[in-house]
Amino acid sequence: MKIAVLGTGNVGHTIGTKLIVLGHTVMMGSRSADNPKAKAFVAEHPNEASAGTFSDAARFGELIFNCTSGAGSLEALGLAGAHNLKGKTLIDLSNPLDFSKGNPPSLSIVNTNSLGEEIQKQFPETKVVKTLNTMWCGLMVNPGLIGGGDHQVFLCGNHEDAKEKTKVLLKAFGWKEKNILDLGDISAARGTEMYLPLWLRIWGATKNGSFNLKLVS
Amino acid sequence: MKIAVLGTGNVGHTIGTKLIVLGHTVMMGSRSADNPKAKAFVAEHPNEASAGTFSDAARFGELIFNCTSGAGSLEALGLAGAHNLKGKTLIDLSNPLDFSKGNPPSLSIVNTNSLGEEIQKQFPETKVVKTLNTMWCGLMVNPGLIGGGDHQVFLCGNHEDAKEKTKVLLKAFGWKEKNILDLGDISAARGTEMYLPLWLRIWGATKNGSFNLKLVS
């Protein structure tokens, strides 16, 4: 599949690399077409990867991963263009962390709204699925790194077909069916985004970011 | 030990009962001295339990459990009286859930503050420890109900001696040392309180409130 990865940071690089390993072709999108990190990514995968603006990438992708930092996601998606995102599944991995007042960060959208919902509202003809935003990116594409892969990934969104497409990709990333928990509509993004402050505190207490949650019942 | 349990709901009843099983004497505090639920609790344990106002109970207790609903906690603690709480450990189990705008609830204190922190600010001579607020009350006092008890309880607070006292009680409740994670100072209550929206969504998706999180790393 032709997939756009918006964002050139660790998350975008990790997702893009895994997608190529899985046989997809990837265009990495960023603010400028000559982003050095995007160019380096293309140099690593000259046959399967390309780079362009957010708009170029969104036009290219049959499916889009939002791997931009939460503080810039709405602007990045605006640059990508609603017409380029129309009708497509947008898998949103971002968290609205606001570091402007120092550490620990607060959330810029919170409580009665979430970044996932806000993206869905601003791009009503796009099918937003929130997932994978509750863990370090190394685990997103390799859950077997810890605990035999037996821990949880959440997803939510308003469009069942988009959630099914996302589940197929999650399984290709290594997630088992029993560990993928559908939390319902996109408003559940409040829950997964508001978990971030606890995630950061656990990381701080354990000095280890390579952890995840397993539901015990 | 003489322990005050503020609040007569399921959480207060569960905590109070467990404390009595463990050999403590308990005064259950509520808005009025003749609260029917508190009287019923005393009738169940005529030798070990008593009931009174929030103020009576706080005066009685060497240690205080706040089991009031989050929406009323600050008022209840005000009625308990700062002088009755002074120098004591206050174990805070509440969550600032606001159901006034319907379901799902939002949080009335959130993001750059938390109910745990607000209690500590309003009662600076009391030693507030936030714990156990991330699960159904049945698990609080019986973690072995699920997964062999191998799942997490978090605690945080500014006072090491109060956290140590709390850990002793948590272990008496059945929690293993390895499953008790100290998240640091009381500002970590933002993390555990902001987890509630995810908790509620998981409950909604699984139709089972008897679950908890295990950290996998």
Image (tube, coloured by chain):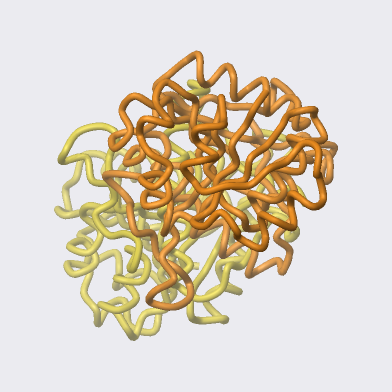
Chain colours: A orange, B yellow
Q: Is residue A31 above or below residue B124?
A: above
Q: Is residue A131 above or below residue A138?
A: above
Q: Is residue B59 above or below residue A144?
A: below
Q: Is residue B210 visible?
A: no
Residue at 56 percent across and 81 percent down: it is B161
Locate residue B160: give its quadrant.
bottom right
Locate residue B37: give its quadrant.
top left
Where is residue A3? Give x, y as percent: 62, 31
Side of B124 where A215 appears, left or right: right
Where is residue B71? Give x, y as percent: 22, 52
Residue at 25 percent across and 32 percent down: it is B103
Q: Is residue A187 visible?
A: yes
Residue ranking furthest to the front: A34
Q: Nearer the viewer, residue B108 or B158?
A: B108
Q: Nearer the viewer, residue B80 or B217?
A: B217
Where is residue A42? Give x, y as percent: 74, 49
